[in-house]
Image (cartoon, grey):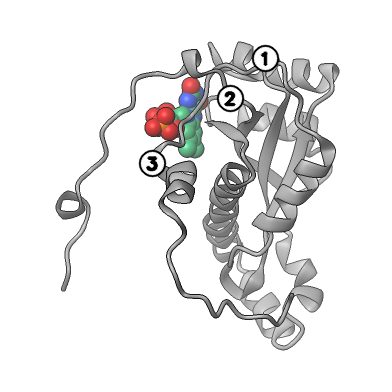
Amino acid sequence: MINQANTMNSALPSAALDQLFRAARSYNGWSDRPVAEDVVQELYDLLKWGPTSANVCPARFVWVRSPEGKARLAELAMGTNRSKILAAPLTVIIGNDLDFAERLPALMPYGAETFQKYFAQPAVAEVTAMRNGSLQGAYLILAARALGLDCGPMSGFDNAGVDKVFFADTRIQSNFICSLGYGKPDSLFPRLPRLTFEEAGRFV
Ligand SMILES: Cc1cc2nc3c(=O)[nH]c(=O)nc-3n(C[C@H](O)[C@H](O)[C@H](O)COP(=O)(O)O)c2cc1C
């Protein structure tokens, strides 16, 4: 697996592209169907393969599923995000570990020392953690959709409060949270437009 390359180089079937992108939505309400623990493990085992710079893998995940955990997270959320967290079977907190470089001897055996020196600069560590942690959060959303789960990402919460409760005594900083489960179609807001290719970019 680890050294295997993708030799297919062919597009996924259109139905798969719908599931990942075109028909995938951000859900606000959830059915009672639970998310099995092995699905969460499988989700991590997919998202972990998404690339990060120097393989730093700075994202850390707290999978909040107990009633007590949900209540503590919900009380730190803004407005309607509270009830969304309480109704979801699971909400994951995606944090960035500012001490990510400690793991480089295992994650990047050749060059770990050089990178550790580079990441010892606080501003470099911070931007690297945010850039790559956010990428890993996006890999999580796509991996969840690939496994048939729906997502409800949210950034409307008290980050410092969440860090105090869920990441005490660490240098992990919450980035965003994402409810996971099987969404209720009637909880969807109308689909919003996206920028066109020309509006969003250009060839040079
Ligand atoms: C990082 C992030 C933070 C978000 N924060 C919130 C939030 O705090 N509350 C909320 O109701 N929706 C939140 N959303 C949902 C977005 O508004 C939604 O994904 C976007 O409008 C696209 O909706 P669609 O996926 O259904 O097309 C967030 C989405 C992302 C990716």
In this view, 31 is above or below 200: above
The answer to the question of whether label 1 and label 3 lie on touching residues, with beta carbons closer than 8 A, is no
| Rendering coords of residue 20 (x, y %) | 48, 46
| Quadrant that contains the C terminus | bottom left
Sequence-wise, which precedes: disc 3 or disc 2?
3
In this view, 140 is above or below 160: below
Q: According to the image, label 1 marks what residue?
A: 87
Sequence-wise, which precedes: disc 2 or disc 1?
1
| Spatial separation of the CA atoms under disc 1 and disc 3 | 25 Å
Q: Is mark 3 within 8 Å of ligand 1?
A: no
Amino acid at dot 2: Phe
Amino acid at dot 3: Arg
Residue at image position (80%, 26%) is 65
Q: Secondary structure at mark 2?
A: loop
Q: According to the image, label 3 marks what residue?
A: 22
Which tag is nearer the camera, tag 1 or tag 3?
3
Amino acid at dot 1: Ala
| Quadrant that contains the N terminus | bottom right
| Spatial separation of the CA atoms under disc 2 and disc 1 | 16 Å
Q: Is mark 2 within 8 Å of ligand 1?
A: yes
| Quarter of the view holding residue 40 | top right
Left or right of 108 in this view: 24: left
The answer to the question of whether label 2 and label 1 lie on touching residues, with beta carbons closer than 8 A, is no
Circle 2 Cα neighbour tier, 10 Å, few/some/many (<14 / 14–19 / ≥20): many
Identify which residue, 34 or 158, lies in the foreground: 34
| Rendering coords of residue 171 (x, y %) | 74, 49
| Spatial separation of the CA atoms under disc 3 and disc 2 | 28 Å
Q: According to the image, label 2 marks what residue?
A: 157
